[in-house]
Amino acid sequence: MTEALKDLCEAGGIDEVFAVGPVPMMRACSELTRPYGIKTTVSLNSIMIDGTGMCGGCRVSIDGKSQYACCDGPEFDGHKVDFRQLADRLNTYREFEQATLERWQASHSAPPGMALADAGRLASAESEAH
Ligand code: FES
């Protein structure tokens, strides 16, 4: 994806880029457009949890200032987002999440590697059958 964007940036004529999706992709797009001076807007709705400004899950540093995606965004200037800090924070519970997923899958007889959504559908089907 970033190769195609790089080709477009090099060709010129782009006024603004909108990046919506996973945080690593938005980060890559922002870093790619930075040297070209192309305004890049990212949508951080993917990091929101309750969307009320209460949980703090969507806190992000924008140009050194703490903001909340749900209250202050979710669109931000991608060149001002501290993506390194955001990625670190999003990975804080990765180990615990993986362990919990594996325990859940084991207790629901989900085959290793089954996607969480598929495992969830399996669990729903099992509970409806009882
Ligand atoms: S989603 Fe909870 S504070 Fe923004």
Image (tube, rainbow, N blue to C red):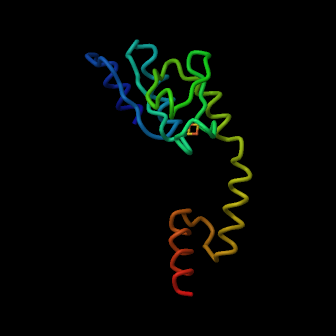
Residue plotted at (30% across, 17% down): 15
Q: Is residue 50 above or below residue 124?
A: above
In the depicted structure, whether residue 123 falls above or below residue 83: below
Where, quadrant-wise, is the C terminus in this rendering?
bottom right
Examine the rendered structure and indicate whether residue 8 appears above or below residue 52: above
Given residues 74 and 42, the one toward you in this image is 74
Q: Which residue is drawn at the image coordinates 40% and 12% (left, top)?
A: 37
Q: Residue furthest left?
A: 13
Q: How many marks?
A: 0
Image x and y of residue 48, in percent: 54, 40
Query: Is 22 drawn above or below residue 73 in the view shown?
Result: below
Quadrant in which the N terminus appears: top left
Q: Quadrant of residue 82?
A: top right
The quadrant where residue 29 appears? top left
Coordinates of residue 63 in the picture (x, y in percent): 57, 15
24 sits left or right of 108 in the view: left
**Figure quarter occupied by ligand 1:** top right
Tell which of 13 and 103 is nearer to you: 103
To which quarter of the image does residue 115 belong? bottom right
- Residue 128: where, in percent of width, then height? 52, 82
Q: Residue at x 35, y 25 (%)?
A: 17
Give how far across and how far down residue 45 sits, in percent: 48, 38
Q: Nearer the viewer, residue 112 or 82?
A: 82
